[in-house]
Amino acid sequence: MDRVPVLKIGEILLVSIQIDLDDQTALQLQEDLSDRIVETGAHGVVIDISALEIVDSFIGRMLSTIAAVSRVLDAETVVVGMRPAVAITLVELGLSLRGVRTALNVDKALEILAEAKQVRGVGVLGFRGSDDVPV
Amino acid sequence: MDRVPVLKIGEILLVSIQIDLDDQTALQLQEDLSDRIVETGAHGVVIDISALEIVDSFIGRMLSTIAAVSRVLDAETVVVGMRPAVAITLVELGLSLRGVRTALNVDKALEILAEAKQVRGVGVLGFRGSDDVPV
């Protein structure tokens, strides 16, 4: 069975989707990713879709699900490498990739994730709680 | 046409091979990689083959060629994620992946490349310590 490899780069997991995803492969990828997040304690997931010429509602939903599951496991997801034509089609189809952050390339995604980690780091240390406590 | 994406991560280029490579795709990959090395000034190339269940003499030769071309362009190549079964088959077939460095995973490959860069950096600049010259 085809399987999309999940690569660990420092505290980030990187997935490059290059094959046509069917139900089974997509489910497998979600499972592999969740397992690896827990196993490695990764705080970010980068999904490269530069090889995809089409992102339909199935893939869109899969990306949203991965982002949602990762968030529950305390990891941010950033989708990178979207082709302009794909972006146009997504909008035309009315797909919004809800809850999915995007960046132009992996380097930019790593910057976003590093910033997100810093912000959360501050939250953990106690300063963020003020959001919840009206003064 | 299928095309293997080349991802830039800092000063490294990462390629994850997941599709069956025919002559055309392999040539395209070599060309894309060389172009990106020149364009980005990358000093290292990491090729992930964890999705490959078979590495035959064709792929073996391609990896050697990529490594050789990259070296001429002043970039080191490290192949990562080789399955144990693939390693066994390679040896049984008498394929040695000449000139190709290997590492267990991307993180280890990045360490190797960082070390290689440092060694070369000192070699090339010679007086690199002078950057730190105290006033």
Image: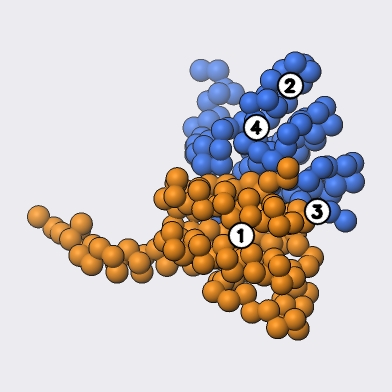
Chain colours: A blue, B orange
Dot 4: what SS?
Answer: loop
- The spot of residue B31 in percent (x, y) is 57, 51
Residue identified by numbered label 3: A3
Identify the subunit bearing mark 1.
B
Residue identified by numbered label 4: A82
Q: CA distance from mark 4 to mark 1?
A: 22 Å
Up the image or down, B10 lies above or below A100; here it is: below
Same-chain check, marks 4 and 3: yes
Q: Are marks 1 and 2 in contact (CB under 8 Å)?
A: no
- The residue that appears at 80% across and 34% down in the rendered structure is A59
Q: Are marks 4 and 1 in contact (CB under 8 Å)?
A: no
Up the image or down, A109 lies above or below B27; here it is: above
Q: Which mark is residue B47?
A: 1
The local crowd at label 3, few if under 14, some if 14 to 19, many if 20 or more residues have their Cα within 10 Å, is some
Q: Nearer the viewer, residue A35 or A95?
A: A95
Q: CA distance from mark 1 to mark 2?
A: 31 Å
Residue type at tag 4 = Met
The local crowd at label 2, few if under 14, some if 14 to 19, many if 20 or more residues have their Cα within 10 Å, is some
Residue type at tag 2 = Thr
Residue type at tag 1 = Ile
Q: CA distance from mark 4 to mark 3?
A: 21 Å
Residue identified by numbered label 2: A89
Mark nearest the camera among 3 and 1 is: 1
- The spot of residue A30 in percent (x, y) is 80, 45
Dot 1: what SS?
Answer: strand
The local crowd at label 4, few if under 14, some if 14 to 19, many if 20 or more residues have their Cα within 10 Å, is many
Q: Which mark is residue A63?
A: none
Up the image or down, B15 lies above or below A22; here it is: below
- The spot of residue A81 in percent (x, y) is 62, 36
- The residue that appears at 65% across and 32% down in the rendered structure is A82
Same-chain check, marks 2 and 4: yes
Identify the subunit bearing mark 4.
A
